[in-house]
Image (cartoon, rainbow, N blue to C red):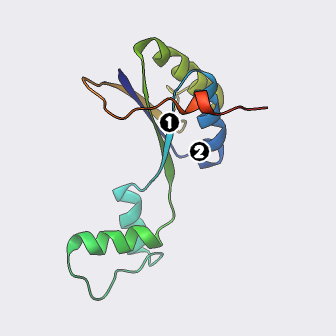
């Protein structure tokens, strides 16, 4: 199995990318909002996001900052058989533009030795 990870700031294209991956054979696609540390630091320093006054831990402070910050990107995750990887790359390029160009996104593939509980959600969904 392979874990395909795609990160992009083109949030408005998120749903179409996920659907394109599904049509390309991904058994499931997880979408996660992203916050980069540099952007969070900028938002805090410019007063866009306020630091909490009373916190129990640094983790709680970070959680409060993230809750009040605007997501700057999205991440797609899909666990697929190796033969599907190229299809997902082609679909991502088609929806976002050439991923080798700046600003379109970053995609990487990770070998997964073992996966438990993976289901094929695409089999249960009919797109008419």
Residue 77, image x and y in percent?
Answer: 44, 36
Which residue sits furthest left? 57
Residue 112's image quarter?
Answer: top left
**Disc 1 target residue:** 105
| Image side of residue 51 versus residue 78, left or right | left
Q: Is residue 96 visible?
A: no
**Disc 2 target residue:** 10
| Image side of residue 18 versus residue 60, left or right | right
The residue shown at (49%, 16%) is: 84
Query: If you read the primary sequence from the N terminus, does the residue marked by circle 1 or circle 2 appear first?
Result: 2
Camera-side residue of 110 and 43? 110
Residue 58, image x and y in percent?
Answer: 22, 72
Residue 12, image x and y in percent?
Answer: 65, 48
Camera-side residue of 116 and 49? 116
Q: Give the position of the C terminus as an image quadrant.
A: top right
Task: Count residues near mark 1 (Cα–Cα under 10 Å), then give few for <14, some for 14-19, many for 20+.
Answer: many
The residue shown at (35%, 80%) is: 51
**Does the residue at mark 1 contact the one at mark 2 (Cβ under 8 Å)?**
yes
Residue 63's image quarter?
Answer: bottom left
Camera-side residue of 103 and 28? 28
The residue shown at (36%, 22%) is: 2
On screen, 110 above or below 105? above
| Image side of residue 36 versus residue 124, left or right | left
Task: Count residues near mark 2 (Cα–Cα under 10 Å), then give few for <14, some for 14-19, many for 20+.
Answer: some
* SS of the residue under disc 1: loop
Q: Is residue 90 visible?
A: yes
On screen, 117 above or below 85? below
């Amino acid at each position: 199995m392979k874990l395909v990870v795609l990160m992009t700031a083109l949030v408005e294209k998120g749903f179409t990318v996920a659907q394109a991956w599904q049509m390309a054979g991904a058994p499931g696609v997880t979408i996660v909002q992203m916050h980069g540390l540099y952007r969070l630091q900028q938002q805090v320093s410019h007063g866009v996001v306020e630091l909490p006054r009373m916190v129990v831990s640094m983790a709680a402070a970070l959680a409060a900052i993230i809750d009040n910050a605007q997501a700057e990107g999205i991440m797609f995750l899909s666990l697929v058989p190796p033969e599907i990887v190229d299809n997902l790359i082609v679909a991502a390029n088609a929806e976002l533009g050439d991923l080798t160009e700046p600003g379109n996104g970053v995609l990487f593939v990770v070998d997964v030795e073992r996966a438990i509980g993976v289901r094929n959600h695409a089999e249960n969904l009919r797109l008419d």
